[in-house]
Amino acid sequence: MSSPALAPYPAVGEQAPGALRGAWQRVERACDSLVGGADANPLRHLGSLAFALFGVLVLSGIYLYAVIDTSAAGAWPSIDRLSREQWYLGGVLRSLHRYAADAFVIVILLHLLREAVFGRFRGFRRFSWLTGVPALALVFVSAIGGFWLNWDLLGQYSAIASAELLDALPFFATPLSRNFINVAAVSDRLFSLFVFVHLGVPLLLVFALWFHVQRISRPAVLPPRAVALPALAALLLLALLRPVMSHPPADLAHVPTPLALDWWLLAIHPLTDIGSPALVWALLALAFAVLLGLPFLPARRAQPPVAVVDPANCSGCRRCFDDCPYAAVTMVPHANGRSGRFMASVDADLCASCGICVGACPSSTPFRRAAELVTGIDMPAAPIGALRARLRRGLQGSRAPRPIAAFVCERAAPLPDAAAADVLALPLVCLAALPPSFVEYALRDGAAGVLLVGCRGCEYRLGRRWTEDRLAARREPHLRPSVPPERLALLWADPGEEDALACTIGALRARLAAQMPPTDPFVGPTAAAPAAGRGMELQDD
């Protein structure tokens, strides 16, 4: 008897990786191999790495501001003296400050590009996108203002070029470039403006970054040590081997040329020289209009309905509240009116329709005797009761006497065709939408083993983390220790890694054949079974 066709759950967004997304994932996998895994790959931690670099800029900047002279006459001598006479601290910190600024810009541009390639700017992600894009302007304004404080030839060139660019706007009654007509025009009052631009704008950036992560639960603001320590070491090494030194002091009587331009931070000035201020403003307006307009473009596929709470089955345990990646779940007074009791409530504007809350709900267990499985919080487009029914029908109608039940994230590598004979595919929006009790339920209902396949970098941020914690009994609901770990395999693989998936399936088949004869089904908890997670296969490639 052939296995019944199992239609995949409705996808959130675009399930197909697309050419750009697929290319980016191949680059990430190549970097994983070079650095020894995803935890050490900076391309997978761009957001948190940007926060760490911003911290380096703040800490180094505090020291530099404390020791330099910010007057018009004393700025250049104090900074030059700092670099030459106190190279072991001040000079290194100055160079670290500059290189961290370059790295900060590179990382946030890569972060922006990655999110755009992955299509992460619509729906529940719209707020983060719309608050992140304006922060780019604050970053560049602050960075450019830093060159003015040095007041060398490069700072002179940048300040005059910026003034001419601003003069093209119809907002100023007096041209700003008049501040640079002669030496007398460059006063301490003007340097106070320079200080405000370089130090005041970052304060606005702090608020912008705070808003940027407001609708994200447990935002990652520090990268793993395997990323942070090498990045800091690379910046320090660069600061020691190629220290940043000042150009000669500013001289308004001469045109400053040639200059060692920082192309990451000051590229806008040569663009103005080549074209015109009006052209540069037009290009900037177009770029920001495109970026800010992306979230409002029509999507190819509508987002499925958001999670729905059933008050009759919600106990107010707060697990869905704790596990939601986007702060879409809040706790409100229970609908039954009992004093002191609470229930979950879902904000439709924040819900990602990922189902992670369903995997966290204690009433999602398939062992409930009710004919129709109804849980405290569920996804209308992919109810947990339908998953249990699919599992039952699939196991009963499989051509193989003891098939492998494979729960597969829709963003992960698809199952190879060769696995169709004895592998029952059960697609999920996110692997963390699967309650761990389904693993034991599948084994009790006739599955020889269970295969869990998720995407490497979770589309919904916390799916991989919560799945691993639940299986290892570090988070509720957890996998019971009576489940034989040799009958379970977990793999994180993106589309394009079908070979790794085929190897994992082969290894699981071999382990099942060696340790569990086909005539010896798993019929209940075994006291002698090893603890969950001790022998479980956790693979990344």
Image: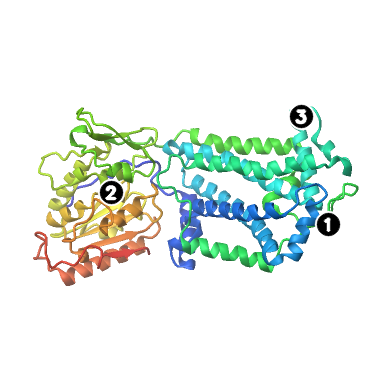
Residue 22 picture location, percent across and down: 46, 53
| Residue type beneath disc 3 | Phe
Of the image marks 2 and 1, the number of the one nearer the N terminus:
1
| Residue type beneath disc 1 | Pro
Q: Residues within 10 Å of mark 2 (few under 14, many from 20)?
A: many
Residues at marks 2 and 1 touching, judged by CB atoms closer than 8 Å? no
Cα–Cα span, label 3 and label 2? 60 Å
Q: Nearer the viewer, residue 426 or 168?
A: 168
Q: Residues within 10 Å of mark 1 (few under 14, many from 20)?
A: few
Which labelled disc corresponds to residue 248? Answer: 1
Element at label 2: strand
When the figure is inspected, residue 49 is found, relative to residue 508, above or below; the finding is above
Of the image marks 3 and 2, the number of the one nearer the N terminus:
3
The structure's colour scheme is rainbow
Element at label 3: loop
Which labelled disc corresponds to residue 427? Answer: 2
**Residue at (53% x, 54% y) in the render:** 52
Cα–Cα span, label 1 and label 3? 31 Å
Residue located beneath label 3 in the image? 172
Res. 98 image quadrant: bottom right
| Residue type beneath disc 2 | Pro
Residue 357 picture location, percent across and down: 29, 43
Q: Residues within 10 Å of mark 3 (few under 14, many from 20)?
A: few
Residue 520 picture location, percent across and down: 9, 65
